[in-house]
Amino acid sequence: FKEITSRFDDIADGKNKFLLQERVTVRERSAEVAEWRQTSSIIVEPKVYGRENDKEKIVDFLLTQARGSDFLSIYPIVGLGGIGKTTLAQLVYNDHRNLSQEKSVMP
């Protein structure tokens, strides 16, 4: 506890030394915009075109190489906005092989 208190004191001294000021900035967003941006695991479109190969590669990786790992890992899907990153993640999440594999592991 003394070490933590000492560290907080050091941080406060640094704030004063560099004349830093506390300022709170709050940006309000309308509820309509926030709700529109919400995502879930549900795929909105009944058929998705052009992502089957990407989905297969990710699912295969997760069910083979990543499955035996003892560590929790994060695998990002990156790219420009609007290219289907969220849709790809939804396809992987909803793949029937993932569900059947997990059910066999659970008691």
Image (spheres, grey):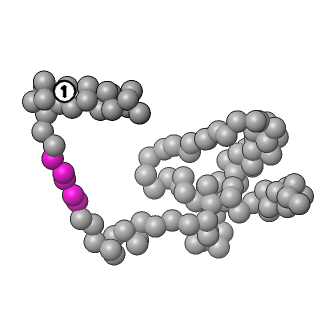
Q: Quadrant of the C terminus?
A: bottom right
Instruction: Look at 22% across and 59% down and name the residue there.
Output: 27
Please state if 15 lies on the left or on the right of 43 as rendered.
left
Instruction: Look at 82% across and 57% down and name the residue there.
Output: 102
Magenta-highlighted residues: 23-27
In magenta stretch: residue 26: yes
Please state if 71 lies on the left or on the right of 60 as rendered.
left
Residue 98: percent from left, percent from top: 78, 56
The 10 Å Cα crowd at callout 1, few under 14, some 14 to 19, many 20 or more, is few
Instruction: Look at 76% across and 36% down and name the residue there.
Output: 70
Residue 52: percent from left, percent from top: 70, 54
Main SS category, magenta section: loop
The picture quadrant where one finds residue 75 is top right
State whether residue 55 is above or below residue 15: below
The picture quadrant where one finds residue 37 is bottom left
- In the picture as drawn, the residue positioned furthest to the front comes out as 2
Q: Which residue is nearer to you in this view: 8 or 19?
A: 8
Using the rendered image of the protein, determine whether residue 60 is visible from the camera's viewpoint.
no
Residue 83: percent from left, percent from top: 50, 53
Residue position marked by numbered label 1 in the rendering: 13
The picture quadrant where one finds residue 18 is top left
Please state if 71 lies on the left or on the right of 12 as rendered.
right
Indicate the amino acid at tag 1: Asp
* Circle 1: element type: helix
